[in-house]
Amino acid sequence: MTVRSGAPVRILLIDDHALFRESVARALSAERSFEVSHCASVAEALRIVETSSVDVVLLDYDLGFERGDRFLAPAKRLGFAGRTLVLTA
C-alpha cells in the first residue's frame, strides 16, 4: 500500500448487516482523514474496487449468503493492492 501524503485513507466496508455497516461508515466518515464507501456483497465490492481507488477493506467474513474471502482473489486480479482487515461476529 502506498501512502499518499495528506490524502484521505479510502476505506471500503463490506458487511451484510445494514445497521452495522451504516453505523461504522458514519463513525469513520466523521474523521476527515477517512473517505468511506460501503456495500453488502462481494459483487458490489468488486465493482467498487474496479472503478474506485481503495486503500483499506474492512471485510466481514460471514456475509450471510456468501463468504467474504471470495472477495480477495478477484480483487487482487483487478489490481487491488491495499490492506484487508477481516471482521466477524
Image: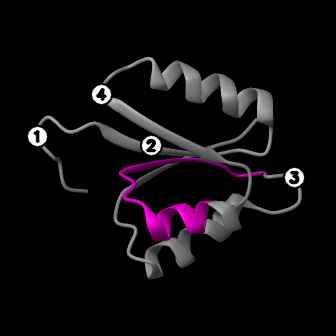
* Residue at 79% across, 52% down: 63
Asked whether, in this view, residue 68 is left or right of residue 19, the answer is left
Q: Whole-Å distance between the Cαs marked 1 and 2?
A: 16 Å
Q: Whole-Å distance between the Cαs marked 3 and 2?
A: 22 Å
Question: What residue is disc 2 on?
Answer: 11
Q: Which residues are magenta?
A: 45-62
The numbered mark at residue 67 is none
Sequence-wise first label, 4 or 2 = 2
Of helix, strand and loop, which one carries label 1? loop
Magenta span contains residue 84: no
Kind of residue indicated by mark 3: Gly
* Residue at 69% across, 68% down: 43
Question: What residue is disc 4 on?
Answer: 33
* Residue at 76% across, 35% down: 89
**Mark 4 neighbour class, 10 Å CA radius: few under 14, some 14 to 19, many 20 or more:** few
Kind of residue indicated by mark 2: Ile
Task: Give the farthest residue toward the bottom.
Answer: 77
Question: What residue is disc 1 on?
Answer: 5
Is residue 24 shown above or below 53? above
**Mark 3 neighbour class, 10 Å CA radius: few under 14, some 14 to 19, many 20 or more:** few
Q: Whole-Å distance between the Cαs marked 4 and 2?
A: 10 Å
Of tags 3 and 4, the one toward the viewer is 4
Of helix, strand and loop, which one carries label 4? loop
